Image (tube, rainbow, N blue to C red):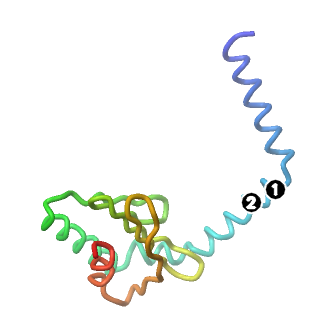
Amino acid sequence: MSFLDNLESNLKDLESGQERDPNERKRRDSERASAQAAAPWAEKLKNSPYTQELLKLAAHAGYQARKKVNMAWLGTSLKLELQGRTLELRPTADGIVAVISKDGKEEQRHPVDLAGSAEELVRQWLG
């Protein structure tokens, strides 16, 4: 049996195994439903002046610390990293949640008001 035949056989086995798992379908449906419920908040997060102000303040804080702030959109979430501290804004069905972590361990989690001040969130993140 050649390598490609073996690979094709393994892929078919994996696909048939996924089809047999009844929980897989339910899990995918629930993930899709939660993504659809969070979609309006994700759109607001991407287009809001709050986000632009947050990015500007984060870049300024990085400049003052003489460090680069890594900024990335991961799907619908915005992730900022500076000196081992991470701020992630995650859209949910109920709104946007800010998750602040240090060295990979979650420290704080709280809702974000897009009409509020981004400066307060940056202060909490870099605290």
Q: Decide: marks 2, 1 in contact (CB < 8 A)? A: yes
Front-most of 5 and 96? 96
Front-most of 80 and 108? 108
Q: Residue furthest bottom?
A: 115
Front-most of 30 and 103? 103
Res. 85 image quadrant: bottom left
The amino acid pointed to by label 2 is Arg
The amino acid pointed to by label 1 is Asn
Res. 115 image quadrant: bottom left
Q: Which residue is mark 2?
A: 27
Q: Residue furthest top?
A: 1
Q: Which mark is residue 23?
A: 1
Badge 1: how crowded within 10 Å, few (<14), some, or many (20+)? few
Q: Secondary structure at mark 2?
A: helix
- Distance Cα–Cα, label 2 vs label 1: 6 Å
As drawn, is 100 to the left or to the right of 10? left
Q: Secondary structure at mark 1?
A: helix
As drawn, is 119 to the left or to the right of 107? left
**What residue is at 25 percent from the left and 60 percent from the top?**
69
Quarter the C terminus occupies = bottom left
Please say if 86 is above or below 3.
Answer: below
